[in-house]
DNA sequence: TCGGGTTCATAGCTATATTCTATCACAATA
DNA sequence: TATTGTGATAGAATATAGCTATGAACCCGA
């Protein structure tokens, strides 16, 4: 793109500008902390390289030529921009002044980001985070391509060779109609009770859908053929039908609002996913990400499960 | 103003941008026509100097850090501006691409510039001339201060140590009422005929006023106490009074429009002023000014003196 | 008109910076 | 396992930018 080197250096531009300011070689040299001959030599070189005389000097007085006037104007602009570049670099010397691109999966994004964002904004006022909502595979691809700085996702799917910091354990909750047999007790539920029950799950592309299907297979639950594209859809189906569904605890407060539904936690060891912040092993600002992950961990909300009758039981189960 | 040197060179910026373009050290080095270790070394140095890692490199892949993204963006800007600076300098390598500031005296400006401007514009399409109308002393002052590149004035006043190129000889013409005794013949006038005649002249600040007074003193003409501030005023006075006045031939066509007036030329050696382009001896683009002066000389108008009865006589006298 | 005190330019040397070639260590690929 | 390709490193060669000392032209005051 830029095959040939520039015929001048930034330092030479400084010399030219300094000389234009004071129109006196000795004084200009002083301001640049070099000797007068050095400044003379550099000026001579730049004029020779350009084939243009920038200053008219006749022993007694130094003044700008028309070419010099135009040159100095542009040179000042360049030096200002170069100063700005130094400023930019130094701002990034503080990694919390960057703009981070972080991928986040759709089954986390709408429930967690509204809680995290204000906390992060307060903790790192100069940090700007651009969230990109994608499924796990796309996040990992973009992460390794360098388009993302980090990803916020579940560790239960294969994430490959990355560094990770766990944010929280997010247990699975059972969402079911009040009228469903499993809604009868308030005890923590054994997963074996799912056997034979009709369960609606997410599309396989969602990692949470994959996890739910695995759990159902292990417990001999019956997986309905319908594949929802979002947790919202999933809950709607249950509210209008006779099946049940699994959703992450983090989503309960926002998704389960229908009074015909109730929510039950599983007995320990409850099925759960592990939410983590991940990044490339070679990422240079890993220390900053570790600290940010720590802040996220502390900001992670206690799930609020105000759908009776199981609020207290699930509250205990979620930790 | 800018005491400390910049922590990077333009060349290093080129390296960084080239590397950001191809994300491969060897290829980037090739594009910059240096060896790969040189590029590695320069990149390492700039990162060390800034204390910021611009590229993340893990043996297999090179990608930009957030800092690197911001840095490269600004670096591209700077390199573009630097290219523009080279362009500016080269354009001035052709001195006919400059903007020249040329001072011109008020007794030349309104009559000559309208004729010169279109010719100069056509001859030097990339040259832009900014005309500054001032009296001779101000022009010479600004010329030596470097605020003007050249001056267009009369050599009959002291112009000091400058280089000059003569544009034209501009003879003095006598403007007088038709009814005046000197209007009786069509012959070229001997200056001695002015003896005893009442002559109106310009203010002394105008060099033409000074010249006219000198001529009057030599020919024993009577100088009226009134001092006009412009040639227009001067001609108006003559049209309404009983005196005569002297104006430069170049001004006749524009100023002498009253049919009650007529114009007479002087016999050779006729009094005249010498219009010239002058500039500092140290001016770097003197060759260009010489050529421009030559173009001005050829563009100099034959005075059109269509005030009868002396049109033909003065036409001859003006060369 | 003759020195001091300016000005900017030049010369010769030195230290630093930049670049080169050659090579290494590592990872992916065949 | 051998090969190819990556970026980093080492040490020598070169180029650059810096310095001091000095020169030539000019101004100014004695």
Image (cartoon, coloured by chain):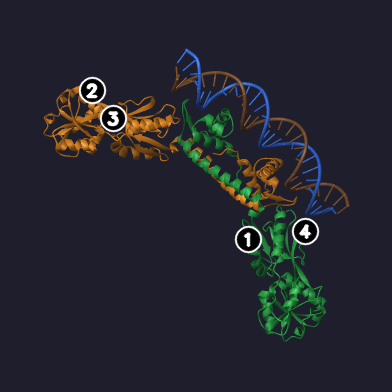
Chain colours: A orange, B green, C brown, D blue
Which quarter shows the N terminus of chain A?
top right
Q: Nearer the viewer, mark 1 or mark 3?
A: 1
Q: Chain of mark 2?
A: A
Residue that numbered label 2 is attached to:
A269
Q: CA distance from mark 3 to mark 2?
A: 20 Å
Position of residue B235 relative to residue A94, above or below, is below
Instruction: Kindly check if marks 4 and 3 are in contact, taking CB atoms under 8 A apart as contact.
Output: no
Labels 3 and 2 positioned on one and the same chain: yes
| Res A189 quadrant in image | top left
Q: Chain of mark 1?
A: B
In the picture, measured across the screen, residue B58 lies left or right of residue A59, that is: left
Mark carried by residue B121: 1
Element class at badge 3: helix
Label whose residue precedes the other's in the sequence (3 or 2): 3
Q: Chain of mark 3?
A: A
Residue at horizontal 75 percent and vertical 55 percent from the top: B281
Q: CA distance from mark 2 to mark 1?
A: 90 Å
Q: CA distance from mark 4 to mark 3?
A: 88 Å
Element class at badge 4: loop
Position of residue A2 relative to residue B98, above or below, is above
Query: Is B25 or A264 nearer to us in this picture?
Result: B25
Crowding at label 4, few (<14), some or many (≥20) Cα neighbours within 10 Å?
few
Q: CA distance from mark 1 to mark 3?
A: 73 Å
Residue that numbered label 4 is attached to:
B161
In the picture, measured across the screen, residue B114 lies left or right of residue B270, that is: left
Q: Chain of mark 4?
A: B
**Image location of residue A286, percent across then percent down:** 42, 29
Instruction: Kindly check if marks 4 and 1 are in contact, taking CB atoms under 8 A apart as contact.
Output: no
Q: CA distance from mark 4 to mark 1?
A: 29 Å
**Image location of residue B88, percent across then percent down:** 61, 49
Which quarter shows the C terminus of chain A?
top left
């Amino acid at each position: 793109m830029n095959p040939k080197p520039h015929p001048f250096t930034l330092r030479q531009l400084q010399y030219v500008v300094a000389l234009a300011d004071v129109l006196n070689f000795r004084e200009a040299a002083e301001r640049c902390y070099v000797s007068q001959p050095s400044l003379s030599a550099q000026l001579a070189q730049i004029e020779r390289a350009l084939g243009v005389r920038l200053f008219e000097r006749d022993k007694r007085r130094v003044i700008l030529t028309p070419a010099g006037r135009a040159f100095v104007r542009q040179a000042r602009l360049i030096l200002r921009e170069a100063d700005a570049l130094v400023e930019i670099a130094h701002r990034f010397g503080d990694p919390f002044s960057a703009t981070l691109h972080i991928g986040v999966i759709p089954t986390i994004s709408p429930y967690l980001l509204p809680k995290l964002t204000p906390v992060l904004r307060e903790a790192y006022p100069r940090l700007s985070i651009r969230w990109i909502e994608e499924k796990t595979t796309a996040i990992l691809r973009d992460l390794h391509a360098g388009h993302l700085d980090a990803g916020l996702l579940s560790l239960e799917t294969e994430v490959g060779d990355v560094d990770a910091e766990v944010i929280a354990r997010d247990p699975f909750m059972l969402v079911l109609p009040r009228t469903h047999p499993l809604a009868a007790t308030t005890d923590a539920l054994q997963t074996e009770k799912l056997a034979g029950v009709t369960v609606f799950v997410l599309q396989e592309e969602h990692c949470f859908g994959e996890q739910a299907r695995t759990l159902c297979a292990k417990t001999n639950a019956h997986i309905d053929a319908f594949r929802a594209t979002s947790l919202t859809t999933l809950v709607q189906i249950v509210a209008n039908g006779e099946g049940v569904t699994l959703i992450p605890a983090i989503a309960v407060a926002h998704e389960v609002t229908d009074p015909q539904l109730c929510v039950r936690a599983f007995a320990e060891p409850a099925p759960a996913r592990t939410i983590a912040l991940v990044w490339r092993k070679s990422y240079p600002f890993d220390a900053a990400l570790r600290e940010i992950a720590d802040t996220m961990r502390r900001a992670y909300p206690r799930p609020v499960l105000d759908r009776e009758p199981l609020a207290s039981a699930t509250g205990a189960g979620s930790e």
